[in-house]
Image (cartoon, helix red, strand yellow):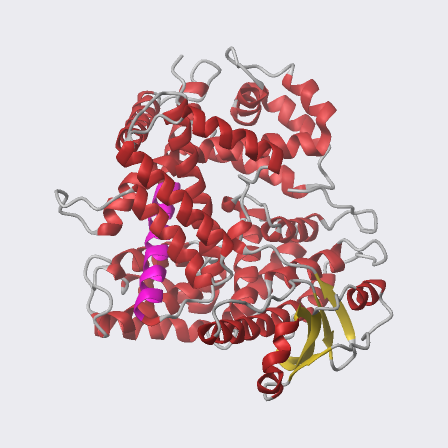
Amino acid sequence: MRKTNNKHWEQPNLDCLLFFAQSIDEMLFDYTLDSYKPLALNSRLLCIECLNILEEIKGDFMPKRNLSSIIEELKWSLNRDIAAKELLGKKFEYYLRQLNPNEIRLKELEIIINHIYGFFDDKKYLEQIKINLIKLIKGNKEKKNIKKLASYYVSELINYGYNPNQIYFQNNNFFFNQSKIIDKVENINDFFNIFDFEVKEFTVVFIGSYIFTQFKDTLNRFDIVVTKNYSCFSNLQEDKNFKKSRKNNESFIISSKIKDFDHHSAKVQAEKFLEQAVNLFNFYHHKQKPELRKKSVVARKEDNYVVVINEPLKSILKTKFEENPASAAIKVERVLKDLKLKSDSLYRFLRCVDLHSAALSTSAIENQILDLWASIETLIPKSSELNQDRIVQITSKLIPFLQINYTDKLFRQIFQDLQSWNKAKMLSILNKVKHDNAKNNFEKTVALITLKENSNFRNSIYNDLDDFPLLKFRIFELNSAFKSPATIKKSLNSHKQKLEWHLRRIYRTRSLIVHSGTYPSYTTILIEHLHYYLDIFLSKIIYYSSQKKFVSIEEIVLEMKINIEYHSELLEKHISEELTIKNYKEVILGIES
C-alpha cells in the first residue's frame, strides 16, 4: 500500500472517491499481498466457470463431484454481492435456493446457472457495479462494499480484455496526476468512460535477432515487417532511444493491424503471435532460437498516441519473497549448508526447486501453472493408503502451511504500511502501547490493532489519516476481524474455506490445460497465487529442516497440521472471552502465555 499524493483533490468530502482510487492502486500493484489483489472470479465469472465445468463433465473430462465446491462458492459470492442482488431483484433468495451443492442434477443446474447468468451478461453486471459504486461514493459511506465492488469492477475489466497494467496506469493518471483537478464525485463517471470497450488498431515495434529475416516473407503475410529501418512514431525521447538501441545484428520487427482495447493488450497479442512463430521455426531448426527484446513501442493508429513499454513483470514473478542477488546468494549458501533432509525428501525438494525454476523461465502461461502445480505434487506425493481424491490429499496437507502464514502476513503487512506512512509516529506509539511482554514491534503492532486498551492510539492514527482512507480502513478492518476470539475463529474458518475453493480452481484449470490445451482468462491471477503458495511451502520446509532439524517433508507436514490443531485449541479455550492483554498472543499468534 502506498501513500498517494492528493494535493490536487480540491474538496474535503471526497473521502470515498479517494478510497476507491487508492483501493484500485493497491489491487493492481505488482507486489501487493495476495489477500488484497482483485478477486480471481466474481459472481458473473463463477457462473461462467460453472457452465464450463458442466461442459467438461458432459465430455467425461471431469467428475461430477467437481461441481460441489463451485456451487458453494457461487452461493457465498452471490450472498455478499450487492450488485448481483440488485439485478436478481426481490426473487434473489428463491434463485439461491435452487443452488444445492449436496444434490446436483446436471440438467437442472445448467438451467438455473444459465438463467442467473442471463441477468449478468452483455455487461449488465458491470453496469450495475458502476451504478452501485456511484451511489455509495456519493453517499460517502459503506467502504466495505465499495472495496468489494471495486474488486468486482477490476475483475470485470480484466476478464473483458483490458490489461491490468493499462487499468493501473489509467487509475494513476486520472486520480493522482497533479496536473488534473479532482473536485467532485461525478469525476468517477469520466474515469469509467475511459474504458469504452471499443477495439482500436495498433502497431507494435520490437527489436529482434537478425535471424527473423530468414522468414520475413512468411511474416509479411501476417502484416509483420522485418526491417533495418524504423521511423519514430513520435518525438518522445524514449522512442528515439529505442530506435538507436538496435544493434547491427538485430532487426526491427513491426507488427501492424493489431486490434485490441489498449496498448498493453496489443503488445501482448503481437508478442504471443511472434513467440508462436519462433516456436514453429525452432521445430524445424533446433540450434538457434530467434530472440525478441521485451521493450517495445506501441502506437495507436487513430491518433498516433505512442507508449514505450518496458518488459512487464510476468504474473509468476509477482511475489513478496523476492531477494536481491547478494542476499539470495547468502541464503543459497546457508540452505545448502544447513538443510537436513534425508535422501528421498531431499530429492523431492530439489526436484521441486527445478520445476519452480522452469516455471519462472517460461513465458507460456500454460507451462507456468503446470510446472508450479507439478512442484506441489512433487512435495505431496499421492498416497494409495488414503481413500481420497488427489486434490483432497493436496489441500489437506498444503492448507495448514497457508493458514499458519495468514495472520502473520496480515499483521506484518499493516506494520510495514504504517511504517511507510509515518515511521517516527509509529515508533513513538509502539513504545507506548499496552501489551503482554511483546518481544518486538510486530507483536506490539498486533496489540495496537486489536486490543480495546489501545483504542486511544488507534484513534490518534485515524485522526491523521484523512488523506489516506485506505490505510484507515485497513486498520479498522483488521480490528473488526481480530477483536475477539469469536471473530478470529470466524475469520480463520472463512480463510480456510476460500483457500480450499481456490486450490480446487487451480487444480481444475491445470486439468483443463492437460485435457484441452485451453485456459480461462483469469489464469494469470491463479499463477500469482499458486506461486505465492508454493513459496510459503518451500520456505517452511527450509526453515524446519535447517532450524528445527526435521529430516523429512512428511515430518514438516505433520508439524504444520499439529500447529494448526494446537492453535485451534488455544483459540477455543478463550472463545467465550473478550480479547485482552493477557490472552491476545495465545488467541491471535498461537503463542502460549
Q: Please name the predominant secondary structure of the magenta segment in the image.
A: helix
Spot occupied by residue 346 in the image (x, y as percentages of width and height): 33, 35
Residue 400 vertical position relative to residue 315 in the rendered view, above or below: above
Please tell me which residue lies in front, 447 or 243: 243
Judge from the rendering whether residue 335 lies leftward or rightward of residue 13; answer left or right: left
547, 46: nearer the viewer:
547
| x and y percentages locating residue 205 in the rendered image | 70, 73
Q: Is residue 513 magenta?
A: yes
- At a point 78% along the width and 79% down the height, the residue shown is 303
Q: Residue furthest front?
A: 287
What segment is highlighted magenta in the picture?
Answer: 494-515
Q: What residue lies at 70% left-to-right and 47% top-to-bottom?
A: 15
Q: Quadrant of residue 371?
A: bottom left
Q: Is residue 226 left or right of residue 548?
A: right
Q: Is residue 186 visible?
A: no
Q: How many marks?
A: 0
350 in relation to 280, above or below: above
Left or right placement of residue 20 versus residue 507 in this view = right
x and y, in percent, of residue 238 in the image: 81, 63
Relative placement, left or right, of 120 versus 16 is: left
Q: Residue at x 21, y 64 (%)?
A: 64
Q: Looking at the image, is 409 positioned above or below residue 132? A: above
Does residue 298 show up? yes
Q: Residue 136's spot in the image, x, y percent?
A: 61, 56
Q: Nearer the viewer, residue 42 or 508?
A: 508
Residue at the image point whose x is 56% and y is 27% from the top: 449
Q: Is residue 510 magenta?
A: yes
Q: Quadrant of residue 325?
A: top right
Quadrant housing the C terminus:
top left
Name the one closer to the observer, 191 or 34: 34
**The N terminus sits in image quarter:** top right
